[in-house]
Image (cartoon, grey):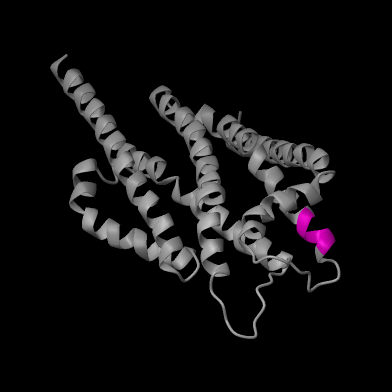
């Protein structure tokens, strides 16, 4: 096959896999749309539990009670369809990988999905109750504690993405060690800078309070250490393999 035809065939396959990925999101979204209101109430539960008695959330936009739950449902559908989306990505790039690369990438795609879900779960079950209780406990004379449903949704989605991406640190470290960009020894030497860096990231990605910043920074630090350990094991195996090849 000539090079132009090969390029066109790759584009056709890419389009096909993108359409399949979008279709998977749609397939998940349609049944969830019937439970959009219930899903939003579930998302709002951590805040509702922290709000003072006889207080409630508000909608400052006429269409917000309709669009906010459906926006949440669409994002949730994407989250749930991530395994199939990653499968389509894997199916597109796998033919161009070597055998040893396939052995590494496939587990990383699975682990990255699980870590992303773990980050979201950590935010919902651990971080939200703490920070919402903190915010609700701040009393200002003449100011009632009420929250717009659209603003709340945007706020929690940002935290979901922040914690989901933060939990991908081990995968990023393993990939860097595998690509030869860095190694475990170098990362250990830069640990003080990493500690400062994770707290800076926590400050930028979370609300301006020490609690939420620490709740993001400390897991990032822990995941960095996990990534360094796994990266060192992989580097050691690579070195042993190279030494074995040199001897033989």
Residue 97 seen in the figure: no
The percent position of residue 25, horizontal first and vertical second, equals 73, 41
Relative side of 12 to 229, left or right: right
Quarter of the image where the N terminus is located: top right
Extreme residue toward the top, this view? 248
Q: Does the magenta portion include 67?
A: yes
Q: Which residues are magenta?
A: 65-69
Tell whether 117 sits left or right of 186. Answer: right
Outermost residue toward the front in this view: 53
In the image, is 248 to the left or to the right of 114?
left
Between residue 125 and residue 186, name the one nearer to us: 125
Residue 88 visible in image: yes
Report the residue at 78% width, 37% height from top: 27
Residue 194 found in image quarter: bottom left
Give percent across and percent down for residue 176.
34, 43
Magenta: main secondary structure equals helix
Q: Is residue 47 magenta?
A: no
Q: Residue furthest bottom?
A: 142
* Number of marks present in the image shown: 0
């Amino acid at each position: 096959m000539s090079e132009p035809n090969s390029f066109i065939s790759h584009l056709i396959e890419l389009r096909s896999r993108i359409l399949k990925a979008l279709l998977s999101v749609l397939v998940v979204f349609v049944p969830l749309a019937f439970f959009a209101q219930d899903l939003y109430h579930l998302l709002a539960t951590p805040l509702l539990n922290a709000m003072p008695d006889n207080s409630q959330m508000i909608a400052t936009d006429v269409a917000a009670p309709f669009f906010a739950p459906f926006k949440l449902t669409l994002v949730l559908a994407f989250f749930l369809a991530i395994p199939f989306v990653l499968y389509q990505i894997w199916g597109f790039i796998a033919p161009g990988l070597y055998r040893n690369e396939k052995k590494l990438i496939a587990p990383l795609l699975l682990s990255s999905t699980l870590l992303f879900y773990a980050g979201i779960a950590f935010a919902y079950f651990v971080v939200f109750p703490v920070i919402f209780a903190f915010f609700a406990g701040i009393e200002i004379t003449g100011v009632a504690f009420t929250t717009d449903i659209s603003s709340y949704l945007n706020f929690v989605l940002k935290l979901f993405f922040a914690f989901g991406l933060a939990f991908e640190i081990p995968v990023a470290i393993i990939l860097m060690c595998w690509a030869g960009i860095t190694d475990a020894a170098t990362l250990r030497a830069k640990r003080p800078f990493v500690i400062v860096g994770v707290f800076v990231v926590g400050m930028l990605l979370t609300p301006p309070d020490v609690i939420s910043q620490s709740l993001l920074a400390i897991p990032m630090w822990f995941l960095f250490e996990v990534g360094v350990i796994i990266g060192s094991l992989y580097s050691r195996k690579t070195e042993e393999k190279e030494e074995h090849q040199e001897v033989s």
